[in-house]
């Protein structure tokens, strides 16, 4: 598993600065929780990491090797090592669960169908969907669809998993089944960056938590520090409001 280092990262949408000098690191097998108000830049970090938005400045390093996002080979390398799961499931509606999970490893990575199918069956069993291989997305609940999306990302055999508000579109009673899946991955040592408003969950699974506001990391530390004894007034204000509700 590689170490991920983000150094003084800056990014913008047109004239709007959305990341303003972000510096964070994630060790092998660790989980970094990203919290903060909407619009603080949390999801943008993940989009930059997988090459969906080019950084304006700063550096991203995987195991001390810098990723040049202007270089197609480097972008391919980073996408071979990182996989992202979005808030929306983005499943292919005309394909069953098994096909949704196997299509990318077969078409993009060129792996054999038989090998990929075996992996997919094991991954779907891990996320509790062994009995849904032949089901189509519209036959599944939102929580089940999101677990398919997680299995699909894992089928690419990433070394780092990026999770972007993966429970935000779910009904409250479906959230726990998705979070249970992430707990298993954390216990198995999957390196992850998790953007979430589920504060109790972030506190539970994260090795470190970064609180962001206005495109900056205001404070970063162990979960107990961030949630129980934050040193910055902006962090204290955010945590007090979140934990009151």
Image (tube, helix red, strand yellow):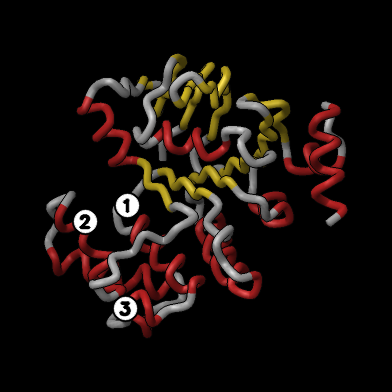
- What's the CA distance linking mark 3 and mark 1? 23 Å
Q: CA distance from mark 1 to mark 2?
A: 9 Å
Q: Which residue is mark 3?
A: 136
Q: Residue at x 52, y 65 (%)?
A: 181
Q: Secondary structure at mark 2?
A: helix
Q: Is residue 219 left or right of residue 50?
A: right
Front in this rendered view, residue 213 or 157: 213
The disc label shown at residue 105, or none: 2
Q: Is residue 203 above or below residue 96?
A: above
- Other residues around mark 2 within 10 Å, as few (<14) / some (14–19) / many (≥20): many
Where does the image place residue 185, in percent across and percent down from the top left?
50, 58
The C terminus sits in image quarter: bottom right
The label nearer to you, 1 versus 2, is 2
Q: Are marks 1 and 2 in contact (CB under 8 Å)?
A: yes
238 left or right of 109 in image: right
Residue 157 — which label?
Answer: 1
Residue 212 % position (x, y): 67, 32
Name the quadrant containing residue 180.
bottom right
Contact (CB < 8 A) between labels 3 and 2? no
């Amino acid at each position: 598993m590689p170490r991920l280092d983000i150094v003084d990262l800056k990014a913008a949408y047109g004239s709007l600065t959305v990341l303003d000098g972000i510096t964070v690191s994630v060790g092998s097998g660790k989980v970094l929780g990203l919290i903060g108000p909407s619009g603080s830049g949390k999801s943008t970090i993940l989009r930059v990491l997988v090459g969906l938005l080019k950084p304006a400045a700063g550096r991203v390093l995987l195991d001390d090797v810098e990723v040049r996002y202007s270089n197609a080979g480097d972008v391919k390398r980073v996408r071979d090592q990182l996989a992202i799961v979005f808030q929306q499931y983005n499943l292919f509606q005309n394909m069953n669960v098994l096909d949704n999970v196997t299509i990318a490893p077969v078409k993009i990575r060129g792996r054999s169908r038989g090998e990929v199918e075996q992996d997919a069956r094991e991954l779907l069993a891990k996320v509790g969907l062994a009995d849904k291989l032949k089901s189509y997305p519209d036959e599944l609940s939102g929580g089940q669809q999101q677990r398919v999306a997680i299995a699909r990302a894992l089928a690419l055999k990433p070394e780092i998993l990026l999770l972007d508000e993966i429970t935000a579109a779910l009904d409250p009673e479906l959230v726990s089944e998705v979070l249970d899946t992430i707990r298993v991955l954390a216990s198995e040592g999957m390196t992850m960056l998790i953007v979430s408003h589920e504060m109790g969950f972030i506190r539970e699974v994260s090795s470190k938590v970064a609180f962001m506001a206005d495109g900056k990391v205001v404070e970063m530390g162990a979960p107990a520090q961030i949630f129980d004894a934050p040193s910055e007034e902006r962090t204290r204000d955010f945590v007090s409001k979140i934990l009151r509700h």
